[in-house]
Image (cartoon, grey):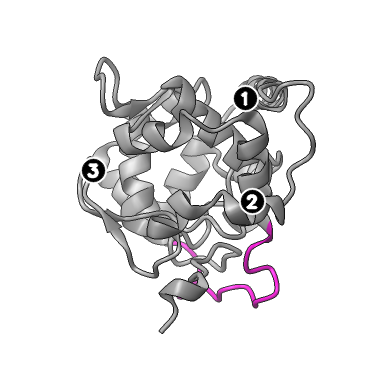
Amino acid sequence: MKTQPNKIIQHLGLLTFAGLIASGAMAQDTKPGDAAAAKSKVAMCIGCHGIIGYQASFPEVHKVPMISGQNAAYLVAALNAYRKGERKHPTMKGIAAPLSDQDIADIAAFYEANGKDTPQRPGKGGAPSAEVQALLSKGNCASCHGEGLNKPSSPTMPKLAGQHADYLYVSLKAYQTTGNSTIGRDNQIMSPQAKLFTLAELKLLSNYISTLPSDLKTVPQPKFKK
């Protein structure tokens, strides 16, 4: 189904509004994120995000997301969403809750810069199948996540390309979940978008997106290197 122009305009208007909300979430006295300052603040992060292939077991078994190379503004928005309970995840809420706005800004800056000196990860797949292309068009995914789903139109939106397929699937399902106190994500853009698809279609999308060339990676911290 082709997205109508007026729906695209409305969608981009919501995108701009979401960006303004995210940018205003940090207190006025919060300084720009300092990646160097975050080196003493990421101890609770590297135990999951600093181990290649590490898996979580909630709400089902899946690899934890690669966040090195992700947009800092998106990471700020995500941590704020966990802190406020808009993203329901007991472990992540417990980690985000005690963080100050400055802590969040610093940690986000750290992960955006982490691994930038290493090459982009090449993709494993080619062009999407006709079925997957139809799903990408139906969701108008590139309007937010950009070329190759790796160049978002707003820094408050995530890079998706190359992310773990099982994590993408769990995340997309979470946007479909409502009325649950421990599982689900509330987002005025993604919630209605995710509900356009069946679970089988979400899995197809996730599997394809995971094969795209990507800036995202897991960078092992020194203590985890062999």
Q: Quadrant of residue 121?
A: bottom right
The residue at which mark 2 appears reads as 38
Q: Are marks 2 and 1 in contact (CB under 8 Å)?
A: no
Q: Nearer the viewer, residue 26 or 198?
A: 26
N-terminal-most mark, 2 or 1: 1
Q: Which residue: 79% across, 35% down?
A: 31
Residue 120 is left or right of residue 186, and the answer is: right
Amino acid bearing label 3: Phe
Residue 39 visible in this rendered orientation of the protein: yes
Up-down relation of residue 116 to residue 174 (above or below): below
Per the image, label 1 sits on a secondary structure element best described as helix
**Which residue occupies the foreground of this view, 191 or 114?**
114
Query: Of circles 1 and 3, which is in front?
Result: 3
Label 2 sits on a secondary structure element that is: helix
Q: Position of residue 127 (x, y in %)?
A: 50, 67
Q: Over which residues does the magenta segment extend?
A: 113-128
State the image quarter where residue 62 is shown: bottom left
Marking on residue 58: 3
Q: Is residue 120 magenta?
A: yes
Q: Residue at x 75, y 29 (%)?
A: 30
Q: Nearer the viewer, mark 2 or mark 3?
A: 2
**Few, some or many C-alpha atoms within 10 Å of disc 2 (few <14, some 14-19, many ≥20)?**
many
Is residue 44 found left or right of 213 in the rendered image? left
> In the rendered image, which residue does mark 1 sit on?
11
On screen, residue 148 versus residue 30, left or right, reads left
Disc 2 to disc 3, how far (Cα)? 26 Å
Label 2 – label 1 distance at C-alpha? 34 Å
- Mark 1, Cα crowd under 10 Å, few <14 / some 14-19 / many 20+, is some
* Residue visible at 53% across and 52% down in the picture: 42
Q: Main secondary structure of the magenta part?
A: loop
Q: Position of residue 58 (x, y in %)?
A: 23, 43
